[in-house]
Image (spheres, rainbow, N blue to C red):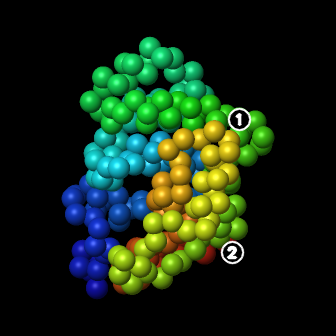
Amino acid sequence: MPLETARCTWPKSETDILYHDTEWGRPTWDEATHLEFMVLEGAQAGLSWSTILNKRQGYRRAFADFDMEKIARFTPKRIEKLLQDPGIVRNRLKVESTVGNARAYLKLREEGKTLASTLWSFVDDRPVDHQCRVMKDIPATTTASDEAAKYFKARGFKFFGSTIIYAHMQACGLFNDHLVNCPCHAQCNELAARRVH
């Protein structure tokens, strides 16, 4: 069955479809990818994912290609400038939380941990295939995302609760939530098997 007739039903725009077909759900242990999604998923809270995808380049520019050391040094003046930038979501709490999360991340790194390895530890470093047949089968949170949210909250992370973390884990392939008839479902499982075995 062609991908265009079998893919998951949520991608509607060209941008959504490209993201679904080439990125979403593919297991990654790459730290830079996880840092990008930490920022983007936090920005998405209460908005459509399409809105964030359309501003992705704006986020890369505004937030120093997600370099946490640089973001952690953003001053109040820099934050005020960001709040005038139409290339991102101009929400003060979200912008300030991104800077705060960068600082919290650097403390995590001082403990010898990475964001990727920490998140993967909540699924025992093995992607979980939820075998979703229809969209309503896809959960908004799981026990793993609940536990991760408590962990990160205790370390000062903001806009990184269970729902946001679950979306992050989906995007980075910790959960395979492609519908089982979507060709990407099997592709993601194959990528996971290469890493795990």
The label shown at residue 197 is 2
Residue identified by numbered label 1: 107
Label 1 crowd (10 A; few <14 / some 14-19 / many >=20) = some
- Seen in the picture, residue 53 relative to 67 is either above or below; the reply is below
Q: Give the residue at x 32% y 49%.
A: 47
* Whether label 1 touches label 2, CB < 8 Å: no
Q: Quadrant of the N terminus?
A: bottom left
Q: Give the residue at x 64% y 47%.
A: 152
- Amino acid bearing label 2: His
Is 45 situated left or right of 100 in this image? left
Is 89 situated left or right of 195 in this image? left
- Amino acid bearing label 1: Lys
Q: Position of residue 180 (x, y in %)?
A: 41, 83
Q: Nearer the viewer, residue 59 or 82?
A: 82
Q: Can residue 173 be seen in the rendering of this structure?
A: no
| Quadrant of the rendered image containing residue 7 | bottom left
Q: Position of residue 104 (x, y in %)?
A: 64, 36
Q: Position of residue 38 (x, y in %)?
A: 51, 46
Q: Give the residue at x 57% y 21%.
A: 73
Q: Give the residue at x 45% y 66%.
A: 140
| Quadrant of the rendered image containing residue 6 | bottom left
